[in-house]
Image: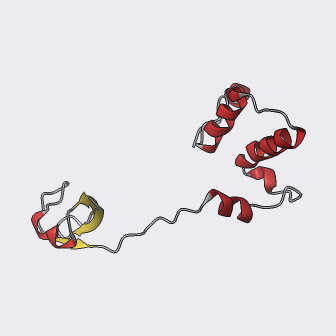
Amino acid sequence: MPVYEFLCNSCLRKVDLFAKSVSSSSSVSCPYCGGQSLTRLVSSFAYHKSLSTIWEESPSEKSPDYYKDPRNIGRWTEKKMKKLGVEMPSSVSQMIQAAREGELPPPVKELNPNVKEI
């Protein structure tokens, strides 16, 4: 079921509600104040790029901005290992995958405990 955004006309809060269709908005109520008068809002949408598109749009390795994106460090490592004909150790592969998902590798966390994961 899709999520629809509504504006409660009683408390003026934006609420996200699961609804079977747009017409079901008349049967839902505001979870904050219980108001029955809700107006459907135009929701934003997500656009997901393919991995190849992300790589094409990322700056060149020669650009000073290339390593500002930590995902590029993993790409560089993968590319160099492949070029050298060396099989990537599974621990390194797992660390790169975790970094792509926003988790900092343990050595980085130990170097600066104040760095927060995103």
Q: In the picture provided, is 33 more to the left or to the right than 43?
A: left
Residue lying at 69% horizontally and 34% vertically, measured from the top left: 93
Residue lying at 66% horizontally and 28% vertically, measured from the top left: 113
Residue 114 in percent (x, y) is at 64, 33
Q: Quadrant of the C terminus?
A: top right
Q: Splitting the image into 4 quarters, where does residue 45 fall?
A: bottom left
Residue 117 in percent (x, y) is at 59, 38
Residue lying at 80% horizontally and 55% vertically, measured from the top left: 66
* Residue 33 in the image: above or below residue 24: above
Q: Nearer the viewer, residue 56 or 64?
A: 56
Q: Nearer the viewer, residue 91 or 32?
A: 91
Q: In the picture provided, is 80 more to the left or to the right than 89?
A: right
The colour scheme applied to this rendered structure is secondary structure
The outermost residue toward the front is 85
Q: In the picture provided, is 73 more to the left or to the right than 114?
A: right
* Residue 107 in the image: above or below residue 9: above
* Residue 42 in the image: above or below residue 53: below
* Residue 72 in the image: above or below residue 56: above
Residue 115 in percent (x, y) is at 65, 36
Q: Nearer the viewer, residue 82 or 64?
A: 82
Q: Splitting the image into 4 quarters, where does residue 30 fall?
A: bottom left
Residue 104 in percent (x, y) is at 65, 35
- Number of marks drawn: 0
Q: Quadrant of the N terminus?
A: bottom left
Residue lying at 25% horizontally and 73% vertically, measured from the top left: 40
